[in-house]
Image: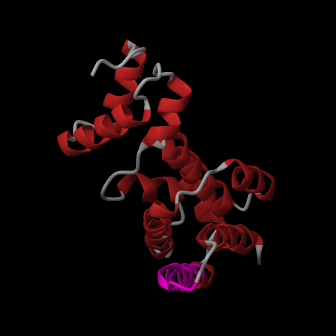
Amino acid sequence: SKLEGLSNQAINLIATNVNLDRDKLTNELSKIRSYFEGKKINLNDLESLLNIKTNDNFNSLKDEALKGNKFKTNELLTDTIFDDNNNILYLSILSQRLLKLKEINNLLKDNNNIETIITKLKPPVFWKDKANLIEQSKKWTKIKLDSAIEKMIEAEKQLKSSSVNKKELIIKNLMINLCLEANSS
């Protein structure tokens, strides 16, 4: 069946989202066909269907919470739509950042220049992420990082227990706790 309203912009959006992964492309096209059957494709619905904003928002939320930015964290907690199917992905994204901060923290003993340390990290830090990492590194001590990792493990246990109804609240509470922890002395 023909997909009405499939513009170059929509095709680019789909291509960018699947990142050259054929299986993901097949899956997304199937999802798009069934969702837009008998309807014209519009970019807003397509973006929602592909979960693009959700993942971008979670990354921003993670960064602002770890910087201790209460205002921005609160704003992003309101704006971010959490997908229960992605809870473990959210924890994984968060875990990677906490471990990276821990690595930086360990290297700070030998060298007090955070920028030099970040430049030497393997794999290299994406240039867009450097400023966030520098700001976060200044807030997180070894003790605070250990505490944050414990909180994350506890959240993962809660998410995996079937008795929890509102899994979104577990993620939101974790982000609030991390934001508060970033500002604690």
Please name the residue shown 34% across and 51% down the image: 124
Residue situated in front as seen by the camera: 48 or 126: 48
Locate the C terminus by quadrant.
Answer: bottom right
- Residue 26 lies, in percent from the top left, at 23, 39
Q: Which residue lies furthest to the right in this view?
A: 71
Please name the residue shown 46% across and 70% down the image: 95
- The kind of secondary structure the magenta stretch mainly shows is helix
Highlighted magenta segment, given as a residue range? 148-163
Compared with 55, 33 (above or below) is above
Compared with 163, 31 (above or below) is above
Residue situated in front as seen by the camera: 1 or 147: 1
As drawn, is 77 to the left or to the right of 141?
A: right
- Residue 70 lies, in percent from the top left, at 79, 59
- Colour setting: secondary structure
Residue situated in front as seen by the camera: 183 or 55: 55
Compared with 110, 39 (above or below) is above
- Residue 2 lies, in percent from the top left, at 30, 18
- Residue 50 lies, in percent from the top left, at 44, 40
Q: Residue furthest front?
A: 38
Locate the N terminus by quadrant.
Answer: top left
Residue situated in front as seen by the camera: 153 or 8: 8
